[in-house]
Image: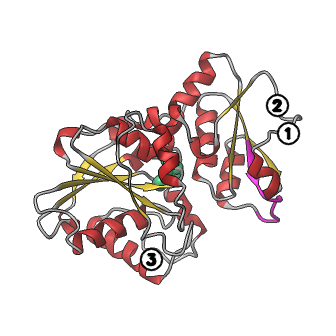
């Protein structure tokens, strides 16, 4: 059986990104599994445990055609011998994305619903059964955040923790796990989604935590990119051997680098960037776009 290797996670100093008096390390949670990588595993683990504990045999979850959460859920269910059903936003496309094809290969049943119905998150009667356990879209929820809080790294070594934000579940989990005087900074990959702060706060245990969410590095919105982002990804890889994806981690690394150049951080700060995987998302880029 396929396994998750949490023990493969490393914290690597990255001199190339360190300047203006701050040091940068990268936490490579992307190494644990090629598909259920990074935060997707940590967000899923307690949902899957809860489903198994209550004797459920089927997981139902939601996502778009390019959702890392969908394919990670499919792979994790395959690993734990659970059935999986993905409720996918929009009509069935003529050509399936890599994400959907992969999910299907892991045995996920795909059920397409119109965008309007999808918004309501109603599960069609034909799919519901007593054996079904529902994981919210993107793994958003307290169990998701609790799983993220178990991401292993040395909390004493860092003053600032930086992560990408989609639903905000990961950011909330990192805030809940941080030491008191550390700061977590999230980089939203969505355009002007100012509801996120509230969504994150709902999952944060200490009510008075300030949410530091940056909205400046979305590059036009979810899964949007430009030539500057692609050349940044290639240069980062050339210099550090760290692969990033254009939906999440490239925007995160770009954002952190920009803030360092702007002297946003006081000299002496020790930053850790959470590399949370998502690399299979790059499959939708044309061949030759990336050097990795
Ligand atoms: C899903 C994903 C995120 C977003 O995580 P949230 O908990 O939804 O904010 C960030 N980075 C990568 C690589 C992801 O796959």
Residue 140: where, in percent of width, then height? 56, 42
Q: Is mark 3 within 8 Å of ligand 1?
A: no
Label 2 – label 1 distance at C-alpha: 7 Å
- Looking at the image, residue 12 sits to the left or right of residue 174; the answer is left
Q: Which mark is residue 267?
A: none
Q: Is mark 2 within 8 Å of ligand 1?
A: no
Residue 283 vs 10, above or below: the answer is below
Q: Nearer the viewer, residue 277 or 203?
A: 203
Residue identified by numbered label 3? 230
Q: Which mark is residue 124?
A: 1
Residue identified by numbered label 2? 128
At horizontal 80% and vertical 63% (from top left) the residue drawn is: 93
Residue mark closest to the camera, 1 vs 3: 1
Q: Residues within 10 Å of mark 2 (few under 14, many from 20)?
A: few
Q: What is the quadrant of the N terminus in the image? A: top right
Give whichever of discs 1 and 3 has the lower sequence position: 1
Q: Residue furthest front?
A: 208
Label 2 – label 3 distance at C-alpha: 42 Å
Which range of residues does the magenta coloring cover? Answer: 86-95
Give whichever of discs 2 and 3 has the lower sequence position: 2
Q: Which secondary structure lies at badge 1? A: loop
Contact between marks 2 and 1 (CB within 8 A): the answer is yes
Q: Is mark 1 within 8 Å of ligand 1?
A: no
């Amino acid at each position: 059986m396929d396994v998750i290797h949490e023990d493969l996670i490393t914290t690597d100093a990255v001199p190339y990104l360190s300047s203006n008096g701050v040091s940068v390390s990268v936490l490579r949670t992307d190494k644990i599994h090629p598909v259920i990588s990074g935060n997707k595993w940590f967000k899923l683990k307690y949902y899957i445990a809860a489903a198994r504990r209550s004797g459920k045999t089927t997981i139902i979850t939601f996502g778009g055609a390019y959702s890392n959460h969908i394919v990670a859920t499919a792979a994790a269910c395959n690993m734990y011998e659970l059935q999986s059903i993905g409720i996918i936003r929009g009509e069935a496309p003529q050509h399936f994305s890599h994400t959907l094809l992969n999910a299907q290969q892991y045995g996920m049943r795909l059920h397409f619903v119109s965008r309007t119905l999808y918004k309501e998150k109603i599960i069609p009667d034909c799919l519901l059964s007593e054996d079904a356990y529902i994981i919210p879209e993107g793994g958003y929820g307290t169990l998701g955040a609790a799983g993220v809080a178990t991401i292993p790294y040395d909390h004493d070594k860092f003053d600032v923790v930086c992560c990408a934000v989609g639903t905000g579940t990961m950011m909330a989990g990192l805030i809940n796990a941080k030491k008191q005087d550390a700061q977590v900074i999230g980089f939203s990959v969505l355009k002007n989604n100012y509801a996120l702060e509230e969504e994150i706060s709902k999952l944060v245990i200490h009510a008075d935590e300030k949410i530091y969410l940056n909205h400046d590095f979305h590059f036009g919105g979810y899964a949007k990119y430009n030539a500057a982002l692609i050349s940044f990804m290639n240069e980062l890889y050339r210099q550090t051997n760290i692969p990033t994806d254009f939906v999440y981690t490239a925007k995160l690394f770009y954002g952190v680098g920009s803030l360092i150049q702007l002297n946003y951080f006081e000299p002496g700060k020790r930053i850790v960037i959470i590399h949370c995987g998502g690399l299979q998302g790059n499959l939708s880029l044309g061949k030759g776009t990336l050097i990795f």
